[in-house]
Amino acid sequence: MNSPAEIPYKSFIKIERNSDTPIYLQLANQLAKAIQLGYIPTGTKLLGTRQLSEILTLHRNTIVNSFQELEAQGWIEIVPNKGSYVLSQTSQKFQKTIVPKQFSINLYPDKTGFQFEQSILLDNPYENFNQRLYLTDGIIDHRLAELKLPAKLYSAILKRKTSISKVNQSKNEYFLKNLANYLNLTRGLHISKENILVTRSSEISLFLIAEILLKQNDVVAVANLSYYKSNMIFQTQFAKIKQIKTDEFGIDTDDLRKLCEQFPIRIVYVTPHHHYPTTVTLSSQRRVELLQLSQEFGFAIVEDDYDFDFHYSNHPILPLASSDQNGMVVYTGKFGHYLAPGYRIGFIVAPKNLILEAKKHLSILDQQVDPFIEQVLGEMISEGEINRILKKHRKTYRERRDYFCHKLKTELNDLISFTSPNGGLAVWINFNQPINLMELKRNCAKNELFIPQTILYQTQHQTGIRLGFAHLNFEEIDEVISILKQEIIKKAE
């Protein structure tokens, strides 16, 4: 049996006296780890509590409590008048204590001890920054998000005696019914609650669609300037990406026909309401042609309507899904992204058979969104609160779009070209003369303006930026345009 003196306790016992974890529990946990790792072998007699308290400079009662905790967990046996022994977890024989020179019970390995394939495609494109001002690809102003009403409703729902049973029994039917009615009224759809699947985000929705529809080497057609996240999602399924030409009317359906004649297209991914990143709206004629092509060549249309709620005219163009009579369109979007973060969801609208299949996949990843949050959202739709909030937000963002475009025109008109979008939260600008966008990014950062690389688009034939305006108030817009003007003029000289 190993001698207690052979165990180099001080080499692996590290007590943090300022930790919230009691000292006796820190000691017990670290001794348990050492036993698990084999550094204190089965059958070893531990030092007595008095000796160990002297070595570790801890009170003897702390050692006693630690040993009692270890015994309760089944790691050691305390034999009266004899000592404490490490219990056998298997039938192994006693071993000699071997402690590596660099061993520390508190370290966690930096790398796995096994090999696995690491993705280059999924490297995080986001960057940390500390500049006071920043640009985005078009997000809401979180300072304006509706916070009080959802919280008030959530609290009220929890206080109802029948809430838990009703929500559990309904299986989200109340919310799904109201969401279906809302989408039918606002987007011209003709769906029921069986045609909707709710997810935690639009990215999860798109991931589910890709997982169900795609196999390895399937071909996905996207616009030649498109959403980087959607491309990443398709590539996780080992799909081949083919690009469709675009112009001021959206994707070129003649070019898509040529692709279909060359390749067996499985999915065409589009953002027709406000094309990402250029914000142009797909023309009515091309919408009809796209639906006809899907029927002719048998590909699925994945329509990502990421910012339908933010339209600034009285008659927004309805989605492709509203005209689909053949079940060729899978429609996905966001709901509630103008509310507090926990109340924002994604959704998929599709024929029932695809929704049923998507539910199978989602049940593995995520059982459901918080049912009480769904109840809140359902009541906000039913009581007209969603429409009220959206009306207020649209007014604010329309004013910001107008002011942002006015500043672009007055300050940068000779250097850029752009069209004021009829909706959405961003403006697409093209530079009249090519400039190095990465250098512009670095120079703006020195002036307290952060520009993420994900909004920069530079090719041999095009230099453009997708400028989000909605998160900026008028004073911030003034500052941002001033910095951009200063640095762009420097580059143009």
Image: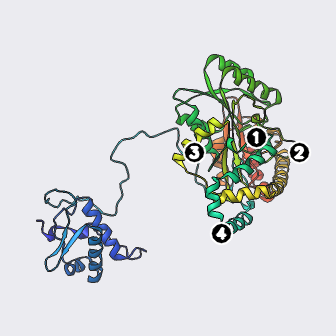
C-alpha gap between disc 4 and disc 2: 42 Å
> Residue under circle 3?
125
Give the residue type that dot 4 points to. Answer: Lys
SS under mark 3: loop
* In the rendered image, the vertical position of residue 141 relative to residue 426, given as above or below: below
Regarding residue 370, the answer to whether it shows in the image is no
Name the foreground residue: 162 vs 172. Answer: 162
Query: Could you tell me which quadrant the C terminus lies in?
Result: top right
Mark 2 / mark 3, whichever is N-terminal: 3
Of badges 4 and 1, the one in the foreground is 4
Mark 4 / mark 1, whichever is N-terminal: 4
C-alpha gap between disc 4 and disc 1: 51 Å
Residue 311 lies, in percent from the top left, at 82, 45
Regarding residue 474, the answer to whether it shows in the image is yes
Give the residue type that dot 3 points to. Answer: Pro
Residue 465 lies, in percent from the top left, at 71, 41
C-alpha gap between disc 1 and disc 3: 20 Å
Q: Which mark is residue 161?
A: 4
Of badges 1 and 2, the one in the foreground is 2
> Residue under circle 1?
428
Q: Which mark is residue 314?
A: 2
Mark 1 / mark 2, whichever is N-terminal: 2
